[in-house]
Image (cartoon, rainbow, N blue to C red):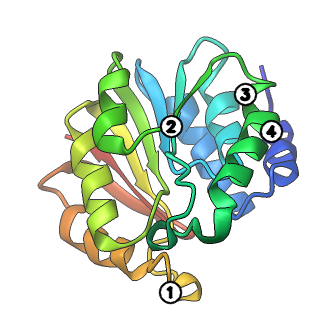
Amino acid sequence: MYTFEESEKECIENSTQSTEEEHRFLFNCAQRAPDGCIVEIGSASGGSIPCLIHGGGAGRIIYSIDPYHIDNEEVGYAGGVGPELQKRFTENVLWKHGNVTQINKQVEHAIFDIKEPIAMIFIDGAHDYKYVYKDFWISFHKVVPFGYIACHDKDDSSQQGNSGCGGVDKFVREVFNNKYFHEVGMCDKIIWGRKK
């Protein structure tokens, strides 16, 4: 069983872009999540996934979805950065953790590769509104009641531009309410809810 401190160390080694507070939140949610798998959408180099792996425990199946487009400026992978991130993710995560399955597809195709119910999903893919909308609604139906759904980079004006984090902010204002969730909260730039 891993401690949060061990998870945080691994996140830092994996070039995380999230804060320690966000990592602690993810670790704790993964520990408290109901039965089912844990899914991360938007893997990059694997900076946050150690918290999901360690918090979820040794028997929990983890899926990491990222198509790693070869050259797609619209989703923030311009200039060939996608294959380099995929290589780093493989070295940082897949070589160390046998319970992680990487799915290199768009969410609308990857969701069919996930046979288990989803206990927790962390959405941190492309940040334009249309991508956040798609990532959320395609996976929403597979999340179990009281399962966690979290979106990263809410209200992050520092990353406006190619990945347009304003799309995250707009989307979560529309959806994170008592119509879909028992409970809603914030942790730094993560907005989260427990599904009804």
Q: Which circle's residue, 3 or 1, is located before the other in the chain?
A: 3
3D distance between C-alphas at marks 3 and 4: 7 Å
Query: Which of the two discs, 1 and 2, sits closer to the camera?
Result: 2
Residue 92 bears which disc, if any? 4
SS class of the residue under badge 4?
A: helix
Task: Name the disc covering residue 104, or none.
Answer: 2
Decide which of tag 2 and tag 4 comes sooner along the chain: 4
Classify residue 165 by image quadrant. bottom left
Q: Residue 185: x, y in percent?
A: 40, 61
Viewer-side label of 2, 3: 2
In the image shown, does 95 or 117 lie closer to the viewer? 95
Secondary structure under tag 2 reads loop
Query: Disc 1 and disc 2: Cα gap in Å?
Result: 24 Å
| Of the pair 139 and 191, the residue shown nearer to us | 139
Q: Give the amino acid type for the residue marked by disc 2 in the picture.
A: Asn
Q: Which residue is mark 1?
A: 161
- Say what secondary structure mark 3 lies in: helix
